[in-house]
Amino acid sequence: MSAPGAEPGGSGRAPSPPDAPLTPRAAKVLHEAARLAALHGMPERGGRPVVGVEHIFLAVLEEEDGLPVQALRDEIDLHRAVALVLRAMGR
């Protein structure tokens, strides 16, 4: 299965991210993701820590009033999800 926007049979390179404005909440999540990446000792590129999707996921889950958390709160144990991601990151 290809990622949205990926070229079928392409080189496997990720497309460049869109240059789109962010909502204040999205900017806050990305800032927190960068903080988490630095906290977990991610290598730096251009003087800034490399942010992985795991850092973004964890930062999204910290936004308790955000739609993703509201949608998942009754379906999964969010604390366990965070613990599982952190454990996987430690491998």
Image (cartoon, grey):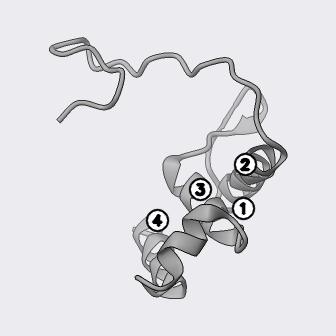
Q: Earlier in the sequence, mark 1 or mark 3?
A: 1
- Disc 2: CA contacts within 10 A as few (<14), some (14-19) or many (>=20): many
Dot 2 or dot 4, earlier in sequence: 2
- Which residue corresponds to mark 4? 89
Among numbered discs 4 and 1, the one appearing first in the sequence: 1
Q: Is disc 4 placed on a helix, strand or loop? A: helix
Quarter of the rendering containing residue 60: bottom right
Give the position of the C terminus as an image quadrant: bottom left
Marks 1/3: CA distance? 10 Å
Location of residue 35 (image quadrant): bottom right
Quadrant location, the N terminus: top left
- For label 3, count other residues whose C-alpha is less than 10 Å away and answer few (under 14), some (14-19) or many (20+): many
Q: Position of residue 52 (x, y in %)?
A: 54, 46
Q: Nearer the viewer, mark 3 or mark 4?
A: 3
Residue labelled with disc 2: 34
Q: Secondary structure at mark 1?
A: helix
Give residue 57's position: percent from left, percent from top: 55, 59
Is 67 located above or below residue 82 in the figure?
Answer: above
User: What residue type is disc 3 on?
Assistant: His
Mark found first going from the N terminus, 1 or 2: 2
**Disc 1 vs disc 3: Cβ atoms closer than 8 Å?**
no
* Residue annotated with mark 3: 55
Q: Residue at x 35, y 18 (%)?
A: 13
Q: Nearer the viewer, residue 84 or 22?
A: 22
Kindly identify the residue that appears in the image at 22 percent across and 12 percent down: 10
The span from disc 2 to disc 3 (Cα, nearest Å) is 7 Å
Q: Which residue is mark 1?
A: 39
**Residue at left 56%, top 64%?**
68
* Secondary structure category for the residue under label 3: helix
